[in-house]
Amino acid sequence: MKLITCDFISGCFGGGCGVLLGHPLDTIKTWQQFSNNRISTSMYNIITRHNGLKGFYRGMFFPLLTNGALNSVVFAVYGQHMRTLQESCKTKSLREREWRMHVMIAGSVAGATQVMLGCPVEVVKVRIQTLQFVGHPWHCLREIIFQEGIWGLYRGITPMMWRDVLPYGVYMLVYEYMLGIEDRLHRMKLDRQAGASGVGSTYEASVIATAGATAGVISWLFIVPFDVVKTVMQTETDPTVHKSMMHCFRGLVERHGWRSLFRGSSMVIARAAPVNSATFLGYEWCLGKCHQYFTIDST
């Protein structure tokens, strides 16, 4: 029970670190995709329409409150599926041979879980960021359900699945491959049990940060168009405007050209590296502190 508690608290803390660091860039990216404007124009609109610099943090409360718990569930799903797949292999050589495929499958299942749980959070966040709703996140949530039904909370779920399911498998594969997670996490675990904090050295911290940043950037490189379509669909309050993902794709290209599908790419890439570094560093640091607090021993 203590281990589960540590994982949950650490996931919440790591997710919170990522949101705090990355939300201003996410707001700029969302405005670019919503309005098809350049970075400078989007920043100007955010400042003027949201009364100053605090506009960059508009809509942060809801994902800050929920993202940590969501991360905990996602990593728990990933870990459980990974263990199940590895245990299905009868020999060590077979486990090693199938390891990459298992990481991809387990990561994709975790990504699907993230879509189902995270889509309502994304809808509320996007509506508040783009001034499609002015008020408290819980009021926005209630308004969406009242005006659009429960399915209003899952607007844009199809492009979100394209954005998150398979790419999340890639994300976990890149992270674990770079970190050499089986060996390094075993050493981290021994360090924690010996009384060390989660990120025990500068070298260890740099490895985690680099692996997280690289995994985030690579997993985002080819999925920006799906993120753009997701944002456009979720900002629209009329369900008849965008009949499907492909309908939205075609509409964007017809109105703004194919380059509109890559609007916000620079912010996505700029945000991916620091956010994922902060998430993994926060997770590892908090996990070590939790293990110290609960005095989890080697047994």
Image (spheres, rainbow, N blue to C red):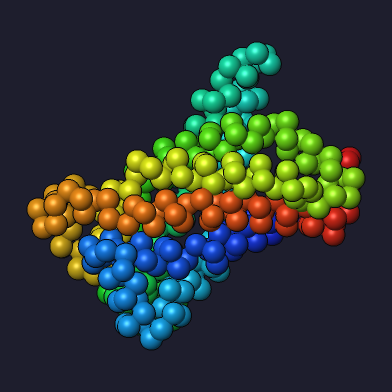
Q: Quadrant of residue 12?
A: bottom right
Q: Is residue 120 visible?
A: no
Of the pair 130 and 296, the residue shown nearer to us: 130
Q: Residue at x 63, y 19 (%)?
A: 95
Pinpoint residue 209: horizontal percent, then vertical percent: 62, 47
Pinpoint residue 214: horizontal percent, then vertical percent: 52, 42
Pinpoint residue 152: horizontal percent, then vertical percent: 30, 64
Q: Residue at x 67, y 34 (%)?
A: 181
Q: Residue at x 55, y 67 (%)?
A: 20
Q: Quadrant of the C terminus?
A: top right
Q: Residue furthest left?
A: 254
Q: Residue at x 54, y 55 (%)?
A: 274
Left or right: residue 32 versus residue 3 is left
Q: Is residue 128 above or below residue 185?
A: below
Q: Quadrant of residue 162?
A: top left
Left or right: residue 109 versus residue 91 is left
Q: Is residue 175 above or below residue 41?
A: above
Q: Quadrant of residue 263?
A: bottom left
Pinpoint residue 44: horizontal percent, then vertical percent: 32, 76
Count the marks: how many? 0
Q: Residue furthest front?
A: 40
Left or right: residue 149 versus residue 285 is left
Q: Is residue 186 visible?
A: yes
